[in-house]
């Protein structure tokens, strides 16, 4: 760096300060002060030691700035070239291990599943090992899995497979997301590391059926459990309890309302319902009043029709 209009007798000093980048890449650099002797216009230099650290830490840029100028003559100032960037390229080669994918999904009835681990920049003379660790999720869903180690022989870039046994437990315990990570990388060359896929997931879906599940209901009470929506006939929903009926107050057996027809004919239609994944499905309808005076009796009927798979409603009621 140079000085202009130096003083004949007074020294000029300025600090070279590291403002960006990791000091460890330049031998843990700390601020250095450069002195221009009085009466001298000669350039001065700062020697920076670049660290050859044997780590695969990538290329970097170290930024420096001139600060705190003192001495000289008049009011000293720092010129337009007050910053300097030093680019350092990494010269190290390090072995890396990585999962081949970041996620997968299997049914618990699959039996076994192979977790593939790949290697890059392997050593010609040293084997490389890595632990496959279950970092979260239930080990019971994969045969009480414990940490396993994969080994890449020296001078081999062949992927390694870890076989996991998936537990088919006969329980309705839902899906489970299992998280794995690569840890404790040893051997190889340079400073071995895990990546780019250092973690991955395996989702195990449940293949067991749940019995006695209410797929959908409509009780006309407006509660969140009314999941079978009405497409036609909602106008017959009423909060009338039926105090003059025989027996009295039987029109609403739960909630606040029911679907009611008084001396007439009406049709209630409910929306399509997706029952994929279910078997042995049955439907029920409840009638709350049975009376010969003010209820269902004589020639009164309730008919229940089911349109299955879009085939249309049958001519004969499924429930009568």
Image: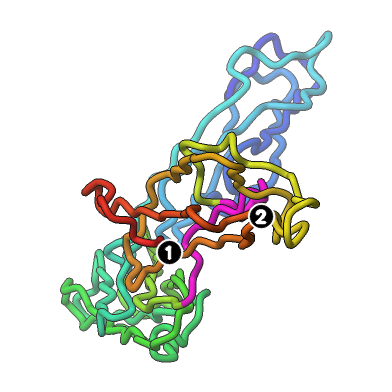
Residue situated in front as seen by the camera: 110 or 264: 264
| Labels 2 & 1 near each other (Cβ < 8 A) | no
- Earlier in the chain: of badge 2 and badge 1, it is 1
Q: Is 297 left or right of 304, judged from the image as shown?
A: right
User: Quick check: is 214 in the magenta stretch?
Assistant: yes
Which label belongs to residue 201?
none
- Residue indicated by mark 1: 283
Instruction: Please report the bounds of the magenta region as a residue range.
Output: 212-226
Q: Position of residue 206 (x, y in %)?
A: 39, 74
Disc 1 crowd rating (10 Å Cα; few below 14, some 14-19, many 20+) is few
Q: Residue at x 30, y 71 (%)?
A: 106
Which is the main secondary structure of the residues drawn in magenta?
Answer: loop
In this picture, is 146 found above or below 314? Answer: below
Q: Position of residue 19 (x, y in %)?
A: 65, 35
Give the quarter of the figure containing the C terminus. bottom left
- Residue indicated by mark 2: 293
User: Quick check: is 8 in the magenta stretch?
Assistant: no
Q: Residue at x 50, y 61 (%)?
A: 285
For marks 2 and 1, give the CA distance: 29 Å
Task: State the SS at label 2.
Answer: loop
């Amino acid at each position: 760096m140079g000085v202009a209009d130096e003083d004949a007798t007074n020294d000029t000093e300025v600090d070279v300060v590291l403002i960006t980048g990791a000091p460890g890449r330049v031998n843990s650099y700390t601020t250095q002060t450069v002195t221009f002797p009085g009466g001298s216009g000669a350039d001065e230099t700062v020697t920076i030691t670049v660290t050859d650290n044997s780590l695969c830490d990538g290329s970097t840029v170290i930024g420096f700035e001139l600060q705190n100028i003192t001495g000289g003559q008049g009011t000293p100032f720092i010129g337009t070239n007050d910053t300097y960037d030093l680019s350092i390229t990494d010269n190290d080669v390090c072995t890396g291990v990585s999962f081949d994918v970041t996620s997968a999904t299997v049914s618990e009835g699959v039996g076994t599943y192979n977790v593939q681990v790949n290697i890059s920049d392997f050593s010609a003379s040293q084997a490389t090992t890595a632990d496959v660790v279950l970092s979260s999720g239930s080990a019971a869903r994969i045969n009480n899995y414990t940490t396993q180690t994969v080994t890449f022989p020296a001078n081999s870039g062949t992927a390694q497979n870890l076989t996991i046994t998936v537990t088919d437990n006969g329980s309705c315990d839902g899906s489970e997301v299992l998280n794995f990570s690569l840890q404790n990388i040893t051997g190889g060359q340079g400073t071995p590391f895990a990546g780019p896929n250092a973690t991955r997931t395996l989702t195990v879906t449940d293949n067991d059926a749940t019995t006695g599940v209410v797929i959908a209901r409509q009780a006309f009470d407006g509660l969140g459990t009314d999941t079978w929506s009405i497409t036609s006939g909602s106008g017959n929903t009423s909060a009338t309890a039926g105090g003059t009926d025989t027996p009295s107050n039987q029109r609403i057996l739960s909630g606040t309302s029911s679907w009611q027809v008084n001396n007439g004919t009406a049709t209630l239609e409910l929306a399509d319902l997706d029952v994929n994944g279910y078997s042995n499905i049955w439907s029920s309808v409840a009638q709350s009043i049975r009376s010969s005076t003010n209820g269902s009796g004589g020639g009164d009927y309730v008919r229940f029709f089911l349109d299955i798979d879009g085939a249309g409603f049958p001519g004969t009621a499924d429930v009568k």
